[in-house]
Amino acid sequence: MTADSAPLALEVTDLTVAYAEKAVLWDVDLAVPAGTLMAVIGPNGAGKTTLIKAILGLLKPAAGQVLLSGKGYEQQRRRVAYVPQRGSVDWDFPTSVLDVVMMGRYGDLGWFRRPRRREQEMSRKALVEVGMEDFADRQISQLSGGQQQRVFLARALVQDADIYFMDEPFQGVDATTERAIIGLLQRLRADNKTVVAVYHDLQTVAEYFDWVTLLNVRRIASGPVSEVFTAENLRRTYGGRIGFVEGISHPTDMLEAETDQ
Amino acid sequence: MSWAGLLDDLVFDYTLRTVALGTAIIGVISGVLGCYALLRRQSLLGDAISHAALPGVVIAFMITRSRASIVLMLGALVSGVLATLLILAVVRNTRLKEDSALGIALSVFFGLGLMLLTVTQRMSDARQAGLDRFLFGQAATLVVADVITMAVIAGLAIGLVLLFWKEFKLVSFDPDFATSMGFPARGLDVGLTTLLVVAIVIGLQAVGVILMSALVVAPAAGARQWTNRLGTMTILAGLFGGFSGVAGALISNTRSGLSTGPVIALVVSLITLASMLVAPNRGLIWNWVRRLRQRQQFRSETVLVDLLALSQQHDSLSYGHSVDAIHAMNRGRRGEVRTLHGLRERRLVTGTGDGMWSLTEAGEAEAQRILQENDGAQAALTRSQIEVAP
């Protein structure tokens, strides 16, 4: 089967989101094949988080359509996993690490059914995968930022999905966690899973991801890193706030964002 | 009256037993639902709802001329829900933040309620209805029928909390994640808030609109101190609330005309205050002891390392050093003598007489270990700084 005939893992058409009549995402199209690790990059306020939330139905788009493996989100929920920004929840909530990870099973469990041994085992396994097995019974407020992030990743793993949406998974994490996340991404790709991750570090985009979407309210470019991660596209995305040394295939030489203007 | 006498009354006095049962139910249900209000940062919403219930009570009486609790409670429910909707509408449609919206709803509804109350007090039958008990609460006015109604409603509410346990927990912790998995976060949110309104409304007659929020906030805040599990916290909050209800009813029974609301609020506040102070791990005293211990340990380590440095200058471990030398090396920090005595008990230093001190061999080993550990930490710190640097 060729890539053309296989349904795309994610297909977004004309997606527009507005807050109080001001467009935060305008007419965005995306087509992501299965088994792809895709970074979503763009300056602050470019609508990266909004894009993910709109795809997941957390925000109501003003217009546009989202298809996951050819079907609407409502039908595909079970095949989707979500890693929100770790700052979006109260980490002083009275619950344990294992409990948070088990929340990833709630969607499959459905209404009223309580998690049981099977869910516990899946969750412990996921904690092993992110190197957090020793923390299962800890209260979540005792975790460092990187450990919190790994708990959220484990929660997404037990969702046992085909496509993973991650909002800033690398935000403020330690080196151990960064390695754990990268290892995880590679395992997901090996299993032909698709990952869409909001990302910030332009220097490592080419190293960690296959595809990249450059976003600044509009979609500037989206495609394989080798094709669309160009100086011209970066300049259009970041509005000339970025320095780029010609002749280097990957823009590793980045100048300070704001002060250079 | 003695405590034994109070307990005696509780068992044998039919009226008091009824009243105490009623306030216990109120305490349990508001404690349980208060946990969710606390965790979702909606404690102030509870305050606004209970104040906003007053006009509903008065209007229900004006329309029906009935003083039956169920009628007045329905009125309270309607105006509590209306106030909640007003708050939501203000937040959604204006630039005002939630705290302002809460303040507006509280003062508008409570003001209206007080005004209507003043007006109705001039009517002859209203004075008998004793509507002013809704201000500060009068548990003695509870009759068996009231208690049965409250028990049924509270039982239903707790049943719903148990039924939706997993869903309520999820939506309180991470509503966006809940939505992404297909749970209606908005609907569950409305459900929880409605249950909170119900819990408040059934407590109004005995506790009063002004202090009912204490029973929502305080048991949950106290319970949170003792545990890191939602289940345990909910049970504890229910127990704290229930106990305060009973204690409040008993104590206010000792003086005629003593309102129950303030007494219950005082009891539950005391429980919470004690929890804040003495609870392990999260309690203030615990924190204070921990900090003191850390400081003491830091002092001991500093003195050991200083003695090591001094002994290295003299090429002799047993050479005595004066407290003054150590004091100078410590840049004037106090308490060296006490620290030295503590270290002598651990056989890490010896006093050589005349106020002179030196390390033992064990003390030397310990000082070396501290130095190495600090070197490691220092190196790690430097490494991380290099990694962070652009």
Image (cartoon, grey):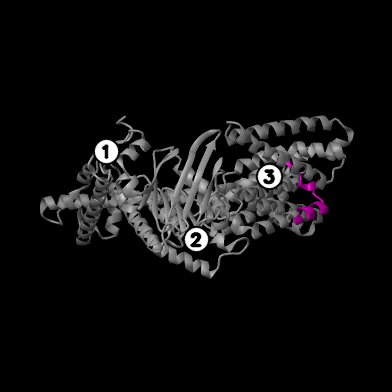
Q: Are marks 1 and 2 on the same chain?
A: yes
The verdict on a common chain for dots 2 and 3 is no
Tag 2 and tag 3, C-beta contact below 8 Å: no
Identify the residue at horizontal 48%, vertical 62% (top origin): A160
Q: Does B354 appear in magenta?
A: no
Specify whether residue B142 is painted magenta. Answer: yes
Q: Nearer the viewer, residue B63 or B273?
A: B63
The residue tagged 3 is: B263
**N-term mark: 1 or 2:** 2
Is residue B224 or residue A19 the one in the foreground?
A19
From what the image shows, is residue B124 above or below residue B225?
above
Q: In this view, which residue lies farthest toward the right? A: B124
Amino acid type shown at disc 2: Gln
Residue B332 spot, x, y in % from top left: 26, 40
> Badge 1: how crowded within 10 Å, few (<14), some, or many (20+)?
some
- Where does the magenta region start and end? B135-152
Mark pair 3, 1: CA separation: 71 Å
Reading the image, the residue beneath label 2 is: A159
Label 1 vs label 2: CA separation?
40 Å
Q: Position of residue A66 (x, y in %)?
A: 52, 49
Percent x, y of residue A141: 45, 52
**B110 horizontally vs A151: left or right:** right
Say which mark, if any, is on residue A244.
1
Say which element carries label 3.
Answer: helix
Q: Nearer the viewer, mark 1 or mark 2?
A: 1
Q: Is residue B249 left or right of residue A62?
A: right
Left of A186 or right of it: where is A79? Answer: right
Q: Image quadrant for the N terminus of chain A?
A: bottom left
Q: Secondary structure at mark 1?
A: loop
